[in-house]
Amino acid sequence: MNTMSYKGQTARIEFDDRSSILVGRLAGIADIVSFHADTVVDLRAAFEEAVDDYLETCAKLGQAPQKPASGRLMLRVPPDIHGAALTAAQAAGTSLNQWAAKVLGAAAMAERA
Protein backbone atom coordinates (compact mmCIF):
# COMPACT_ATOMS: atom_id res chain seq x y z
CA MET A 1 0.00 0.00 0.00
CA ASN A 2 1.33 3.45 -0.88
CA THR A 3 0.67 6.30 1.52
CA MET A 4 1.52 9.94 2.16
CA SER A 5 1.34 11.74 5.52
CA TYR A 6 0.91 15.44 6.31
CA LYS A 7 -0.31 17.31 9.42
CA GLY A 8 -1.44 14.10 11.11
CA GLN A 9 -3.45 12.90 8.12
CA THR A 10 -2.55 9.90 5.99
CA ALA A 11 -3.73 9.25 2.45
CA ARG A 12 -3.87 6.03 0.52
CA ILE A 13 -2.48 6.41 -2.98
CA GLU A 14 -3.55 4.38 -6.02
CA PHE A 15 -2.99 4.51 -9.75
CA ASP A 16 -6.11 4.88 -11.90
CA ASP A 17 -5.14 2.98 -15.04
CA ARG A 18 -8.26 4.04 -16.92
CA SER A 19 -7.50 7.77 -16.50
CA SER A 20 -3.71 7.39 -16.18
CA ILE A 21 -3.59 9.47 -13.00
CA LEU A 22 -2.53 9.04 -9.40
CA VAL A 23 -5.44 9.27 -6.96
CA GLY A 24 -5.37 9.75 -3.20
CA ARG A 25 -7.93 9.72 -0.42
CA LEU A 26 -7.54 10.48 3.27
CA ALA A 27 -7.58 7.23 5.21
CA GLY A 28 -9.13 6.46 8.55
CA ILE A 29 -11.82 9.16 8.57
CA ALA A 30 -15.46 9.17 7.45
CA ASP A 31 -15.19 12.55 5.70
CA ILE A 32 -14.38 12.14 2.02
CA VAL A 33 -11.26 14.06 1.06
CA SER A 34 -9.67 13.06 -2.23
CA PHE A 35 -7.18 14.48 -4.72
CA HIS A 36 -5.39 13.49 -7.91
CA ALA A 37 -2.47 14.44 -10.17
CA ASP A 38 -0.38 13.24 -13.09
CA THR A 39 2.98 13.12 -11.27
CA VAL A 40 4.18 12.26 -7.78
CA VAL A 41 5.44 15.82 -7.24
CA ASP A 42 2.05 17.25 -8.24
CA LEU A 43 0.28 14.61 -6.16
CA ARG A 44 2.21 15.67 -3.04
CA ALA A 45 1.18 19.30 -3.65
CA ALA A 46 -2.45 18.29 -4.27
CA PHE A 47 -2.43 16.18 -1.08
CA GLU A 48 -1.10 19.01 1.07
CA GLU A 49 -3.60 21.44 -0.47
CA ALA A 50 -6.46 18.98 0.19
CA VAL A 51 -5.43 18.56 3.84
CA ASP A 52 -5.04 22.33 4.31
CA ASP A 53 -8.47 22.91 2.71
CA TYR A 54 -10.02 20.22 4.91
CA LEU A 55 -8.57 21.73 8.08
CA GLU A 56 -9.65 25.27 7.05
CA THR A 57 -13.17 24.09 6.22
CA CYS A 58 -13.48 22.36 9.59
CA ALA A 59 -12.33 25.55 11.33
CA LYS A 60 -14.86 27.67 9.39
CA LEU A 61 -17.64 25.25 10.32
CA GLY A 62 -16.55 25.27 13.96
CA GLN A 63 -15.98 21.54 14.08
CA ALA A 64 -12.90 19.53 14.92
CA PRO A 65 -11.30 17.66 12.02
CA GLN A 66 -11.78 13.93 12.25
CA LYS A 67 -8.79 12.05 13.59
CA PRO A 68 -7.69 8.81 11.99
CA ALA A 69 -7.84 6.95 15.31
CA SER A 70 -8.79 7.51 18.93
CA GLY A 71 -6.35 5.04 20.43
CA ARG A 72 -9.12 2.71 21.55
CA LEU A 73 -9.55 -0.59 19.74
CA MET A 74 -12.01 -3.29 20.63
CA LEU A 75 -11.58 -6.71 19.04
CA ARG A 76 -13.58 -9.90 19.14
CA VAL A 77 -11.43 -12.97 18.60
CA PRO A 78 -12.00 -16.68 19.20
CA PRO A 79 -11.19 -17.78 22.77
CA ASP A 80 -8.20 -19.87 21.66
CA ILE A 81 -6.58 -16.85 19.96
CA HIS A 82 -7.31 -14.69 23.02
CA GLY A 83 -5.69 -17.31 25.24
CA ALA A 84 -2.65 -17.65 22.99
CA ALA A 85 -2.22 -13.86 22.88
CA LEU A 86 -2.51 -13.62 26.66
CA THR A 87 0.10 -16.37 27.08
CA ALA A 88 2.43 -14.62 24.61
CA ALA A 89 2.02 -11.31 26.45
CA GLN A 90 2.75 -12.91 29.83
CA ALA A 91 5.78 -14.71 28.38
CA ALA A 92 7.04 -11.35 27.09
CA GLY A 93 6.51 -9.81 30.54
CA THR A 94 3.96 -7.25 29.28
CA SER A 95 0.25 -6.62 29.52
CA LEU A 96 -2.01 -7.88 26.77
CA ASN A 97 -2.59 -4.26 25.68
CA GLN A 98 1.15 -3.57 25.41
CA TRP A 99 1.77 -6.83 23.59
CA ALA A 100 -1.13 -6.29 21.16
CA ALA A 101 -0.01 -2.71 20.43
CA LYS A 102 3.50 -3.95 19.62
CA VAL A 103 2.25 -6.79 17.39
CA LEU A 104 -0.31 -4.61 15.59
CA GLY A 105 2.31 -1.88 15.11
CA ALA A 106 4.78 -4.32 13.60
CA ALA A 107 2.11 -5.74 11.28
CA ALA A 108 0.97 -2.27 10.19
CA MET A 109 4.55 -1.20 9.44
CA ALA A 110 5.13 -4.37 7.44
CA GLU A 111 2.05 -3.52 5.34
CA ARG A 112 3.44 -0.04 4.61
CA ALA A 113 6.76 -1.43 3.40
Image (cartoon, rainbow, N blue to C red):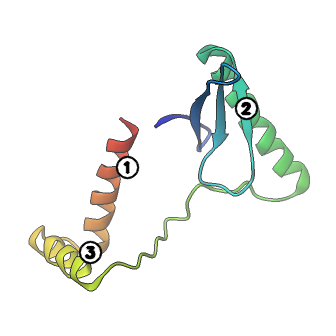
| Rendered position, 24 above or below 98 | above
Quarter assignment of residue 41: top right
Query: What residue is shown with label 3?
Result: 96
| Residue occupying image coordinates x 29% and y 50% | 106
| Residue occupying image coordinates x 26% and y 80% | 82
Q: Amino acid at mark 1?
A: Ala
Q: CA distance from mark 2 to mark 3?
A: 39 Å
Q: Nearer the viewer, residue 36 or 58?
A: 36
Rendered location of residue 4, percent (x, y): 55, 33
Q: CA distance from mark 1 to mark 2?
A: 24 Å
Q: Is residue 31 left or right of residue 15?
A: right
Q: Nearer the viewer, mark 2 or mark 3?
A: 2
Q: Amino acid at mark 2?
A: Phe
Q: Nearer the viewer, mark 1 or mark 3?
A: 1
Rendered location of residue 38, percent (x, y): 68, 15
Q: CA distance from mark 1 to mark 3?
A: 18 Å
Which is more N-terminal, label 3 or label 2?
2
| Residue occupying image coordinates x 65% and y 55% | 29
Quarter assignment of residue 11: top right
The residue at the far right in this view is: 60
Query: What residue is shown with label 2?
Result: 35
Which is more N-terminal, label 3 or label 1?
3
Which quadrant would the C terminus be assigned to in this image? top left
Rendered location of residue 46, percent (x, y): 72, 25
Disc 2 on helix, strand or loop?
strand
Q: Nearer the viewer, residue 77 or 94?
A: 77
Q: Which mark is residue 108?
A: 1
| Rendered position, 58 above or below 39 | below
Disc 1 on helix, strand or loop?
helix
What crowding class fits label 1: few (fewer than 14 Cα within 10 Å), some (14-19), or many (20 or more)?
few
Q: Amino acid at mark 3?
A: Leu
